[in-house]
Amino acid sequence: MRIESDLKLDFKDVLIRPKRSTLGSRSEVDVDRTLRFRHAGNEWTGFPLIAANMDVTGTFAMARALAGFGALVALHKHYSEDDLAAFFEEDGSRGAFYSLGTTESDREKLRRVDGRVPIRMICLDVANGYTEKFVELVAEIRAEHPQAVVMAGNVVTGDMTEQLVLAGADIVKVGIGPGSVCTTRKMTGVGYPQLSAIIECADAAHGLGGHVCADGGCTVPGDVAKAYGAGADFVMLGGMLAGHDECEGDIRYEERDGERVPVGMTFYGMSSDTAMNKHSGGVAHYRASEGKTVEVPYRGPVADTMQEIMGGVRSMMTYIGARKLKEVPKRTTFVLVGSQLNTVFGG
């Protein structure tokens, strides 16, 4: 047993210090990035935000909506082979990751879909990216799909980030336990403060020509801005994109003035009882549920939320004088704080 005594930080622990800027308006900044991938060898340009590969948010409708903002979606893995093939044939160029886990049936399904229509972006997703088997699987997926951009995770430390990049990952997904419907930290005691995880993993990945995706922990647009400031190349969102028309959660309605109106939508973690009962017939005897099920307010079309997120990022860039999104980490100075918000009129 050992204790690391150096301070590790989360989004709530810091603010970004403003700097003198020549920018006069949010309209002068560019929130798109062009990223070149180490292994796939191709480039991608857009707003580097990804809807999480959860049942509720990783949907075809979300992919079509976010494409209008230049953003991406990691589709959930429970769509049928026919539906996935049809989507990628018609809308694949919009920017969607094909998601899979580590089972042989997942890999066979990917091979079949890829045989029908080429898959250009793959999200290899597990809760624990620290096993030797997972590293070997990343290498195998890279060998089988040499032209595809491979995103793999999750991890929270620089050493495993380097190992996954060397094994074949173009993007390493960073985050253990920070998600709004994740209970891994509560159930296992395992995790890492998300801001520090992003900083350390980004340093490791960038030294090898790789990229990182900050997965989890963002609750407001300012957290997305901080993730970019910490070095994240992509930011993945679940809870912030839940509750919208493009999601697939169950909607709760209420009668108001004689009219039936939507007021809430179900949102749940992919390791929750809800997800495992739905897809696996229940929680396996050798594991515990590590997710929760909640109801989030119904929020209408996702376009309104995307405008808020992108507007917040643009405003942050004007505060620190970053004309392009790629400049943000170099111009970011975090300051430690005891509190961030004045909550006298609520949260």
Image (cartoon, rainbow, N blue to C red):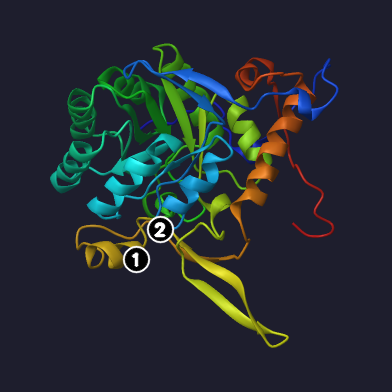
Q: Choose the circle earlier in sequence order: 1 or 2.
A: 1
Residue at 30 percent of width and 55 percent of height: 79
Query: Which residue occupies the foreground of this view, 183 or 179?
Result: 179
Please give left or right for residue 62 compared with residue 127 in the image: right
- Position of residue 232 measured from the top left corner of the image (x, y, whole percent): 53, 27
| Neighbours of disc 1 within 10 Å: few (<14), some (14-19), many (20+) | many
Can residue 44 be seen here? Answer: yes
Looking at the picture, how far across and down is residue 244, in whole percent? 57, 59
The mark tally for this picture is: 2
Corner quadrant of residue 205: top left
Which image quadrant: the N terminus?
A: top left
Check the image and report above or below for 199 versus 114. Answer: above
Density class for disc 2 (Cα within 10 Å; few <14, some 14-19, many ≥20) is many
From the viewer's side, name the closer residue of 342 and 46: 46
Q: Secondary structure at mark 1?
A: helix
Task: Tell which of 35 and 1 is nearer to you.
Answer: 35
